[in-house]
Image (spheres, grey):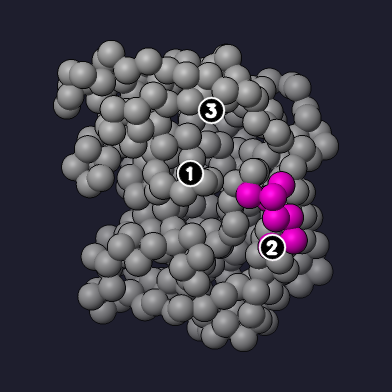
């Protein structure tokens, strides 16, 4: 998809993270000036090492919990893509206070700084966790349930603050509810690693992946290039109906965890035939997890012209190749 976005000054918070670093790269490739704000709590310098020499890329090592860092980073900026957050439902259950400080107080700092520095538009990473205990499928933006984790609470509060700032201070905001994003540069290590890079790493090392539950929980797995497209479209949309609202960002399909592991084994076997024989193990269900997640993407298609190009299988082929070459 051809996107006309060039010669703008754009701040990406959490720009050294998985999604943020992919956004920084895409924005630079389009000919923009990119500022990355990151404290490297979860982001990695190697994610942006290829970008640092670029004269149109600036790195600010700072923390969104510090309002002065936020004011400095948003100065003379056209747009903000706010990706900085402490992700992970289990992390938030273990340490709700830090998750709240980063995801709520940090978010508010960024909104306030963006408003004070007259940023044109503030696009932020929302989350499918906002749907909480709602059992309706597919998930539609205006029908949510009660949050099931501290993380989900923080991401819903983000949407409330964005709505209030749009109405009170006149800043354009768009929230993108990500559904299980995966792809290149996603960290397979650590206690809170996302399921796809974790499973890929285990299979590559000859280890049995452990599925939480019986494997019949399903997710709308979303490849990183679909997410990059949605962010860029959110920045350039001139449709007044498209701003000051939230969108599901997904492929619009769902696959079980058992399906996922089957695909991973199939694609990895082309690199190492022994992977086909690795058995899968099952553990208990994880606290705070929702059984099924499936997004309606009709709203994003209609108002943002969102056209996701990567299904789970197409995205997994790309991701597996990247991990095989880089892990």
- Main structural element of the magenta stretch: helix, strand or loop? helix
Which one is closest to the eye, mark 2 or mark 3?
2
Give residue 241's position: percent from left, percent from top: 66, 48
Which quarter of the rendered picture does the N terminus lie within?
top left
Q: Which residue is mark 2?
A: 98
Report helix, strand or loop for mark 3. loop
Q: CA distance from mark 2 to mark 3?
A: 28 Å
Decide which of tag 1 and tag 3 comes sooner along the chain.
Answer: 1
Query: Would you place residue 11 above or below residue 280 in this image?
Result: below
* Residue 97 falls inside the magenta stretch: yes
Q: Residues within 10 Å of mark 1 (few under 14, many from 20)?
A: some
Task: Describe residue 11's horizontal placement relative to residue 89 as left or right.
Answer: left
* Res 299 quadrant in image: top right
The answer to whether mark 1 and mark 3 are in CB contact below 8 A is: no
Q: Kindly tell me whether residue 147 is visible in this rendering.
A: yes
* Residue 154 falls inside the magenta stretch: no
Q: CA distance from mark 1 to mark 3?
A: 18 Å
The residue lying toward the viewer, choosing from 174 and 253, is 253
Report helix, strand or loop for mark 1. loop
- The magenta-colored residue range is 91-98
Q: CA distance from mark 2 to mark 1?
A: 18 Å
Decide which of tag 2 and tag 3 comes sooner along the chain.
Answer: 2
Q: Which residue is mark 3?
A: 220
Task: Describe residue 199's horizontal placement relative to residue 29 as left or right.
Answer: right
Give residue 293's position: percent from left, percent from top: 62, 26
Residue at x-position 81% and y-position 34% = 145
Q: Which residue is mark 1?
A: 193
Task: Describe residue 240's horizontal placement relative to residue 222 as left or right.
Answer: right
Give residue 271's position: percent from left, percent from top: 17, 26
């Amino acid at each position: 998809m051809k996107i006309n976005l060039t010669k703008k000054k754009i701040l990406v918070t959490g720009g050294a993270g998985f999604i943020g670093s992919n956004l920084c790269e895409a924005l630079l490739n389009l000919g923009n000036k990119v500022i990355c704000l990151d404290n490297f709590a979860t982001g990695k310098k190697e994610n942006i090492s290829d970008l640092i020499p670029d004269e149109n890329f600036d790195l600010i090592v700072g923390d969104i919990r510090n309002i002065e860092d936020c004011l400095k980073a948003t100065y003379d900026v056209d747009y903000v893509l706010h990706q900085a957050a402490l992700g992970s439902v289990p992390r938030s259950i273990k340490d709700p206070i830090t998750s709240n400080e980063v995801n709520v107080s940090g978010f508010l700092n960024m909104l306030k700084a963006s408003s004070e520095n007259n940023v044109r538009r503030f696009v932020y990473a929302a989350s499918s966790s906002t749907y909480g205990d709602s059992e309706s499928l597919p998930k539609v933006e205006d029908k949510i349930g009660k949050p099931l984790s501290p993380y989900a609470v923080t991401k819903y509060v983000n949407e409330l603050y964005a709505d209030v700032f749009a109405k009170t201070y006149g800043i354009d905001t768009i929230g993108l509810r990500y559904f299980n994003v995966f792809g290149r540069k996603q960290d397979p290590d650590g206690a809170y690693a996302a399921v796809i890079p974790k499973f890929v790493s285990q299979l590559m090392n000859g280890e049995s992946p452990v599925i939480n539950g019986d494997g019949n929980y399903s997710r709308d797995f979303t490849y990183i290039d679909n997410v990059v497209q949605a962010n860029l479209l959110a920045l350039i949309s001139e449709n007044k109906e498209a701003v000051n609202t939230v969108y599901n960002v997904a492929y619009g399909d769902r696959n079980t965890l058992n399906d996922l592991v089957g695909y991973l084994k199939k694609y990895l076997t082309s690199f190492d035939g022994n992977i086909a024989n690795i058995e899968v193990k099952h553990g208990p269900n994880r606290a705070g997890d929702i059984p099924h997640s499936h997004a309606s993407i009709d709203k994003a298609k209609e108002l943002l012209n969102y056209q996701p190009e990567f299904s789970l299988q197409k995205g997994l082929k790309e991701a597996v190749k990247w991990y095989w070459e880089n892990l």
